[in-house]
Amino acid sequence: MTDFFPSHNRTGTPVTSTVMLMTTSASVPTTSEGAITTGTVTDRLVEANERYAAAFTDPGMDARPVLRVAVVACMDARIDLHAALGLELGDCHTIRNAGGVVTDDVIRSLTISQRKLGTRSVVLIHHTGCGLEAITEDFRTELEMEVGQRPAWAVEAFRDVDQDVRQSMQRVRTSPFMLHTDDVRGFVFDVRTGMLREVDPA
Ligand SMILES: [Zn+2]
C-alpha cells in the first residue's frame, strides 16, 4: 500500500471513512489473536487530521448548508456521499445510520436542519447490498438472550429496498415537525456501479 490516507481535494472536503475502512483490515497491525488493535486505527486518524489541519484554511462559512439540503443515508462504508453527489464542503447536512432509516432521531436532526439551519430539501439514500437485508427483527431477541435486556429500538430490517425507501419518504412527509415536505426524494445507490436510481414515491 502506498498511501493509506488519500489527499484531500482542492475544496477541503473531508476524506470520508470509505477508503480507510475498506483498507483497514489489510493494513492495520493485529495482535497474536488476530484482533485489530483499535488504538492504532485511531492514531492513524489523528495523524491524518494533523496533515488535514496543516493544509486547512477557514472557509468562512456559517452553519447553514449552502444548498439547503439534508441527505439521509446508510452508514455503509462504500457510499462516499460527497463524491457521489458532487457535494462540496458546506453544501449539505449529512445524517447517516444503519440503513439510512428515518428514526425519531433522524426526525430530530431534520427538524433542527429545517427549522434552525434553513434546509428545504430532503434526499434519502438507501443502497444495494445493505446489511439490513441480511438480518431480521430476531436480532433484538438474540441480543436479549445474550445480555438479558431487549433493546428499545427496532432493528428496521427490510427485504425490499424500494419499499423501505418509500416508507422513509413517508415518515419524513408525515412528520408534524417538518417545515418543508414538498421536495422529499428517495433513491437506491448501487454500490457496484455508483449509480443512483430514484424510487417512485407512489
Ligand atoms: Zn446499508
Image: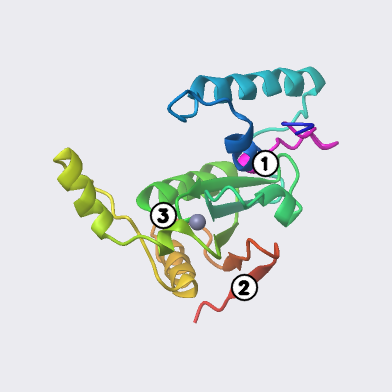
Q: Residues within 10 Å of mark 2 (few under 14, many from 20)?
A: some
Residue pointed to by mark 2 = 198
**Magenta segment:** 5-18
Circle 1: residue type: Val
Q: Secondary structure at mark 3?
A: loop
The quadrant holding residue 10 is top right
Picture coordinates of residue 163, whole percent (x, y): 44, 74
Q: Label 2, label 3: how many angstroms apart (C-alpha)?
A: 25 Å
**Label 3 near label 2: C-beta < 8 Å?**
no
* Residue drawn 16% across the image and 46% down it: 145
Q: Is residue 106 positioned above or below 129 on the image? A: above
Q: Which mark is residue 19?
A: 1
The mark nearer the N terminus, 3 or 1, is: 1
Can you name the residue that lies furthest to the bottom here?
Answer: 202
Q: Nearer the viewer, residue 85 or 172?
A: 85
Picture coordinates of residue 131, whole percent (x, y): 45, 57
Q: Label 1, label 2: how many angstroms apart (C-alpha)?
A: 26 Å
Q: Secondary structure at mark 1?
A: helix
Q: Secondary structure at mark 2?
A: strand
Residue pointed to by mark 3 = 177
Q: Nearer the viewer, residue 125 or 185?
A: 125
